[in-house]
Image (cartoon, rainbow, N blue to C red):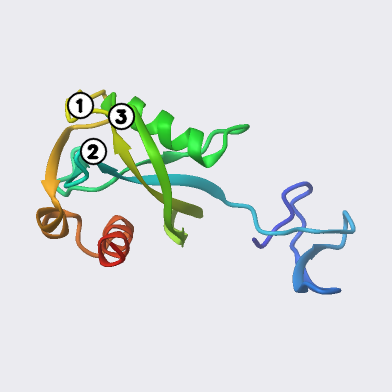
Amino acid sequence: MKYCVECGTKLIYKELENEGMIPYCEKCHEYRFPIFSSAVSMIILNPDKNKILLIKQYGKPSYILVAGYINKGENALEAVKREVFEEVHLHVDELTFNSSEYFEPTNTCMFNFSCVSDSEDFSLTNEVDEAKWFSFEEARQYIKENSLAKRFLMHYLDHQ
């Protein structure tokens, strides 16, 4: 963050006790901690826990994980359930935190969870072009290369 979110003044770095060098607005006399979006992505398992649902979106050719932003007033677990239902009309439970990573291109902290669907019978919404259940080995093969989705999936599969 280079400019104050309140007044637009260029920020300087100033020492804050027990915090280190923090962006500071000399006009507002306030420290400005980083602001970023929060989102969730999901490794969706079928009820037998032997397949993973991957999707394609926005006309792109690669398979990715279901993901979406956390809404104001919503916690991450609520966002997981809402996003899965919004995108593929599945209900999920057994939500387990997998990993998190800051994604600079969208200034987003992404929290990844695994979850178990109540069925393999998904239906697509206007947010998803295609969805398919894959075995764990197939998911490793088909997930988008060099992506955050792949890093989350590999972390999950490598720690099973």
CB-based contact (under 8 Å), mark 1 and mark 2: no
Which residue type carries mark 3?
Glu
Q: Position of residue 42 (x, y in %)?
A: 34, 45
Nearest the viewer among 134 and 83 is: 134
CB-based contact (under 8 Å), mark 3 and mark 1: no
Q: Nearer the viewer, mark 3 or mark 1?
A: 1
Residue drawn at the location 33% of the way across and 59% of the way down: 152
* Left or right of 137, for residue 157: right
* Left or right of 114, for residue 72: right
Residue drawn at the location 17% of the way across and 47% of the way down: 50
Nearest the viewer among 58 and 115 is: 115
Quadrant into which the N terminus falls: bottom right
Residue with the mark numbered 3: 87
Marking on residue 57: 2
Q: Nearer the viewer, mark 1 or mark 2?
A: 1
Q: Position of residue 80 (x, y in %)?
A: 42, 37
Picture layout, residue 127 above or below residue 10:
above
Picture layout, residue 62 above or below residue 86:
below
